Amino acid sequence: MVKRIGSMAWRVEVGADGQLFALGVRTDTGREYEVLLGTADSTPILSDLLNEIARVHRGLPPRVFAPDAGPHHPRSVPLQPLATRIEDHGGQPVLALDFGGTILKVQIDPAALQRDLAAYQASR
């Protein structure tokens, strides 16, 4: 699968056995980089990246996207994990999203989640 934004492009490949992931990125200068990730290291890399993004954006005003950019882009679709479950992590509920080789764990606030689900149901 190859995606392109402007002159930048990236390619994602997953080995047939699910053991190796390759991410190729071509920059504006034309240089191409390839990052190989094993199944074991994919989760910490993704978690570290998202934690750093959240840390940086915590002190900034909420991000506003143009009508056709970011999550509003027509090709931006929700991810569908293979399995979803709730786990306990230090007494806090955690939503575990299993994508096969990667499990993304997201800490949740049950009360806020129930409020948001109720608001979603009311809007339909």
Image (cartoon, rainbow, N blue to C red):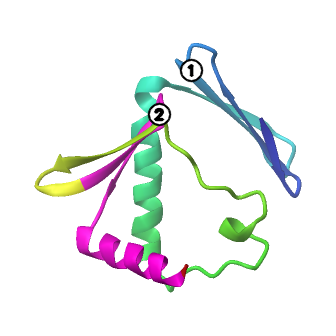
Quarter location, residue 71:
bottom right
Label of residue 4 in the image: none
Residue 19, position in %: x, y? 52, 18
Q: Residue at x 40, y 72 (%)?
A: 117
| Badge 2 density bin: few <14, some 14–19, many ≥20, Cα 10 Å | some
Q: Nearer the viewer, residue 39 or 75?
A: 75
Counting residues from the start of the chain, the first of labels 2 and 1 encountered is 1
Report the front residue among 14 and 99.
99
Q: Residue at x 52, y 83 (%)?
A: 123
Q: Which residues are magenta?
A: 94-123
Q: Quadrant of residue 78?
A: bottom right
Whole-percent x, y for residue 100 in the image = 47, 29
Residue in the image at 45% along x and 55% along y = 50
Q: Position of residue 39 (x, y in %)?
A: 47, 25
Residue type for callout 1 = Leu
Residue identifier under label 1: 20
What is the spatial separation of the Cα atoms under label 2 and label 1, in whole angstroms?
9 Å
* Residue shown at 46% from the left, 83% from the top: 122
The disc labelled 2 sits on which kind of residue?
Ser
Find numbered disc 1 in the image and state the secondary structure of the residue it sits on. strand
Q: Is residue 58 above or below residue 16?
A: below
Q: Residue furthest left?
A: 91
Q: Secondary structure at mark 2?
A: helix
| 119 in magenta | yes
Q: Which residue is the site of mark 2?
A: 42
**15 sits left or right of 4 in the view:** left
Taking the magenta stretch, the answer to whether it contains residue 120 is: yes
